Image (tube, rainbow, N blue to C red):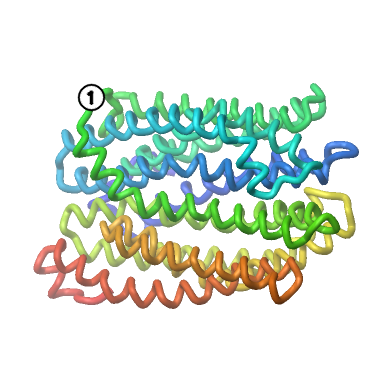
Amino acid sequence: MRQKNDLGRDPVGSLVLRLAVPTMLAQFINVLYSIVDRMFIGHIPLVGDLALAGVGVCGPIVTLLSSFSYLACLGGGPLFSMKLGAGDREGACAILSNCLRMLLGMAAGLALLFFLLRKNLLWWFGASADTFPFALTYMTIYILGTAFALMATGLNNFLICQGRSGLGMATVVLGAVLNICLDPLFIFVLGMGVAGAAWATLLSQAASCAFALIALTRPFMPIPLRWGRFDFSICRKVIAFGMAPFLTYSLDSVILIVLNTVLQRRGGPVEGDALLTCCSIVQSYMLLIAMPMSGITLGCQGLISFNLGAGDGGRVKKALRGVFSLCLAFAAVMLVFTHLASPLFVRLFTKSEYLMGRSVTLIKIYTAGLLFLPVQWVAVDGSTALGQTRLALFCSLLRKTIFVSNVVLLPFFFPAASAFCAEPLCDVIAACVSAALFLRFTPQTLAAHCRPVDRLADPGI
């Protein structure tokens, strides 16, 4: 696969594939961080199911912590690509150096805050007396590696924005492979249990962070990473652009925290922990869908923003169509996989026949609206790449509001497990509204940025 892509001249269709597929695979491999941890944890002798439930409580909190990297990488990424498209290398370099500062500052502040609040967060968001010790152990160790988690994700995006999708994929593959190797060594051979899984994740993220830093500082990069000069106005613009994707991903964590809490409270002592174990498995499966799909849209954000900055509306439209088609094809494949192979996936996490049966059923319910997800993903991430941050934020908040409302209300009228029905309901409703808004406002944005010949040649999306 080519290491370098010309975002302004290469054919759009092949560019979408060359940018999206490595990023999609990288995100898929990145999912292995949590899936492999949970898979091995679920098979710890005697306490596997409880330990899995405890780590399941940590999952959304850990994701919330990591999502702060998107303020820098998904806020700075489109601005960075627009500067590249406009030929402003100095401006692109300034954005990259200031995003590095933002990542370092956020890592320091968040590590301290989450460490001080970790016990309260776990009690508030679904831990029980039986699962709390496992959750606390995992959470404490993970927080120590906050800087590695944020830097690995944040800096990797700037490799992709410069057309180095192969290096972006290598960053993630390095960490994932290392995690897969260290998990069984630490958990079983050294007998570290849940702590071993956390240390394996921390060391793997440290390796990914180091690789991304080294790659970005090499002279062959179009815009190599330099310390540069602090510019508050750049940081403010980055935050303004990044707020929509940050809220998208951080609120995804919040709604899963709400789901965990509702399942524990409404399930009660009889089935609360069992539902949390099932939820951990369901969310692990959903990561196999959501993360690669986000990899497709995020991998092509640089392509969209670059050509918007260059004033080529025709290429922007082709890129949006290509991204949507690829997302839809992926969703269709995963829907078939869900109904044919989800029992095999669940078996990786537990030996309990009861938990296996419930988890398979809940996975099929949770993914019932899967074919509507590509619409939502393209609307939110595509709007961000086009600078339509308010539209992206509204579409994201709408989906999350629908989800939380259903999670809270459904268990009042039906059994606690009915909370899982919130996902397909919000997938369908939010996708319809987001599609209508995206098709309404995007042509205006293109008309304002593209050259007159583009507007005359192809006025529609």
Where is residue 109, by image quadrant? Answer: top left
Quick check: 287 above or below 440?
Answer: above
Most extreme residue toward the left is 452
How busy is the neighbourhood of tag 1: few (under 14 within 10 Å), some, or many (20 plus)? some
Image x and y of residue 263, in percent: 71, 59
Name the foreground residue: 106 vs 23: 106
Image x and y of residue 151, in percent: 44, 32
Where is residue 213, by image quadrant? Answer: top left
Q: Which residue is mark 1?
A: 228
Element under disc 1: loop
Q: Residue at x 23, y 55 (%)?
A: 307
Where is residue 459, by image quadrant? Answer: bottom left
Residue 357 appears in the rendering = yes
Query: Along the horizontal axis of the image, is 102 left or right of 271?
Result: left
For the image, the number of numbered tags is: 1
* Image quadrant containing the C terminus: bottom left
Name the foreground residue: 298 vs 45: 45
* Image quadrant containing the N terminus: top left
Residue 18 appears in the rendering = no
Q: Residue at x 82, y 46 (%)?
A: 49
Image x and y of residue 283, in percent: 65, 55
Quick check: 409 above or below 23?
Answer: below
Q: Residue at x 83, y 63 (%)?
A: 357
Question: Given the image, on which type of amino acid does mark 1 rest?
Answer: Gly
Query: Along the horizontal axis of the image, is 60 left or right of 270?
Result: left
Name the foreground residue: 392 vs 131: 131
Name the foreground residue: 97 vs 231: 231
Q: Residue at x 34, y 64 (%)?
A: 320
Image x and y of residue 224, in percent: 28, 28
Query: Along the horizontal axis of the image, is 433 left or right of 183?
Result: left
Quick check: 113 above or below 455?
Answer: above
